[in-house]
């Protein structure tokens, strides 16, 4: 039986590269707090944009996709889901909204995890949300020759309730230790959750919701404004490799948490870096207005509208924004989706 024990984090003997990233995150987090006081309206708009990115990114990691226009309609609740993929997307939207709006009230326990799953799968007729798996599941991959291989065997269904109970108790115990940094503890918990794989479906998406919830509860909220899930999606090869490395020998209690921990912390660091970069564009008056508009469009992870550019660059007139966008289109740097008020712009090199 797997033992859940995070006491190894108390000695502080972690790789220097991980510790350096955590220190850098601390510096950027302080800067974020200062920026919030100055740019409250912009942070609100960035949160709206990040929700779109999070819903798209977290589902895309699992191969659940639709168009950007449909993502926006579903997230803004302007349209009902049209197919199974969109039902999955709308479920993640509802669970994400709960995390965003109530993270300070939610607790890290089995009841909340089951409830998140129930909300996420509420309209999914193929899955009963809010209950653990009833049959054993396997993580299956396809090798270079097209053969299916078992990449990982999660905890059996019969042992899942006990494993989840022990996971939560181990986390609660470690959280009370002043010797353990929460940024080290959270990815260890997420890795163990993924290795248990407690649900018949939706484990990856629930793990990302839990990641955000635990980060928010510990004061690391960059993922509200720069999508944590979208960063994982952009670098999902590295994410899956770290998960594979850290899950080896997991059942024997000799697994190495550090690859997954480093990837998790690096992803959060990229969120803070991206947030800082956004505001560097806003505040750097040495750049021309044209350069600031260009940089904002090119740095956007999703197609961006003129209205959103106005929020990000409040001192630049709509006429200037329109002129720069037109010039960028004429030179082929960007393309436009939609027309009039619905038009969105994206880098010609940003889409896969």
Image (cartoon, rainbow, N blue to C red):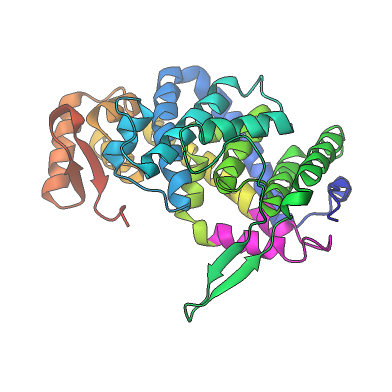
Residue 118 vs 332, above or below: the answer is above
Please state if 25 lies on the left or on the right of 96 as rendered: right
Q: Name the spot of residue 260 as percent of width and height, x first.
A: 67, 55
Q: How many marks?
A: 0
Q: Name the spot of residue 141 as percent of width and height, x first.
A: 55, 68
Residue 276 vs 204, above or below: the answer is above
Viewer-proximal residue among 159 and 295: 159
Residue 4, visible in the rendered structure: yes
Quadrant of the frame with the N terminus: bottom right
Please state if 50 lies on the left or on the right of 244 as rendered: left
Toward which corner of the image does residue 338 lie, by quadrant? Answer: top left
Q: Is residue 245 magenta?
A: yes
Please state if 227 lies on the left or on the right of 206 as rendered: left
The part of the chain drawn in magenta is 238-262
Q: Residue at x 55, y 61 (%)?
A: 238
Q: Name the spot of residue 24 as percent of width and height, x first.
A: 63, 43
Viewer-proximal residue among 149 and 41: 149
Viewer-proximal residue among 179 and 4: 4
Residue 108, visible in the rendered structure: no
Q: Name the spot of residue 235 as percent of width and height, x first.
A: 49, 56
Quadrant of the frame with the C terminus: bottom left
Q: Residue at x 70, y 47 (%)?
A: 193
Residue 266 vs 318, above or below: the answer is below
Q: Is residue 199 magenta?
A: no
Viewer-proximal residue among 117 and 262: 117
Toward which corner of the image does residue 45 lie, by quadrant? Answer: top left
Main SS of residues in magenta: helix
Q: Residue at x 38, y 30 (%)?
A: 75
Direction left: furthest residue = 330
């Amino acid at each position: 039986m797997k033992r859940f024990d995070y006491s190894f984090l108390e000695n502080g003997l972690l790789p220097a590269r991980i510790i350096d990233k955590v220190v850098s995150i601390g510096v950027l987090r302080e800067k974020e707090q200062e920026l919030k006081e100055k740019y409250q309206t912009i942070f609100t708009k960035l949160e709206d944009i990040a929700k779109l990115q999070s819903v798209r990114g977290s589902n895309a990691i699992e191969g659940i996709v639709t168009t950007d226009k449909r993502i926006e309609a579903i997230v803004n609740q302007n349209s009902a889901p049209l197919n199974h993929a969109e039902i999955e997307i709308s479920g993640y939207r509802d669970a994400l909204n709960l995390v965003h709006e109530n993270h300070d009230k939610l607790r890290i326990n089995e009841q909340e995890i089951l409830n998140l799953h129930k909300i996420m799968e509420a309209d999914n007729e193929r899955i009963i949300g809010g209950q653990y798996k009833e049959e054993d599941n396997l993580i299956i991959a396809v090798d270079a020759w097209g053969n299916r291989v078992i990449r990982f065997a999660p905890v059996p269904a019969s042992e899942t309730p006990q494993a989840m109970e022990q996971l939560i108790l181990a986390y609660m115990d470690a959280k009370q230790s002043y010797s353990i940094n929460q940024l080290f503890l959270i990815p260890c918990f997420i890795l163990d959750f993924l290795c248990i794989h407690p649900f018949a479906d939706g484990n990856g998406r629930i793990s990302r919701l839990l990641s955000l919830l635990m980060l928010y509860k510990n004061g690391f909220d960059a993922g509200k404004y720069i999508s944590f899930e979208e960063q994982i999606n952009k670098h999902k090869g590295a994410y899956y490799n770290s998960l594979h490395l850290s899950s080896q020998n997991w059942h024997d209690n000799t697994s190495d948490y550090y690859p997954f921990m480093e990837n998790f912390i690096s992803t959060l660091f990229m969120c803070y870096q991206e947030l800082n970069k956004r505001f560097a564009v806003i505040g750097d008056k040495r750049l021309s207005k044209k350069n600031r508009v260009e940089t904002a469009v090119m740095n956007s992870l999703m197609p961006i509208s003129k209205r959103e550019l106005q929020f990000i660059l409040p001192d630049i007139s709509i006429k200037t924004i329109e002129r720069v966008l037109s010039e960028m289109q004429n030179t082929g740097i960007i393309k436009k989706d939609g027309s009039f008020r619905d038009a969105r712009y994206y880098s010609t090199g940003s889409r896969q």
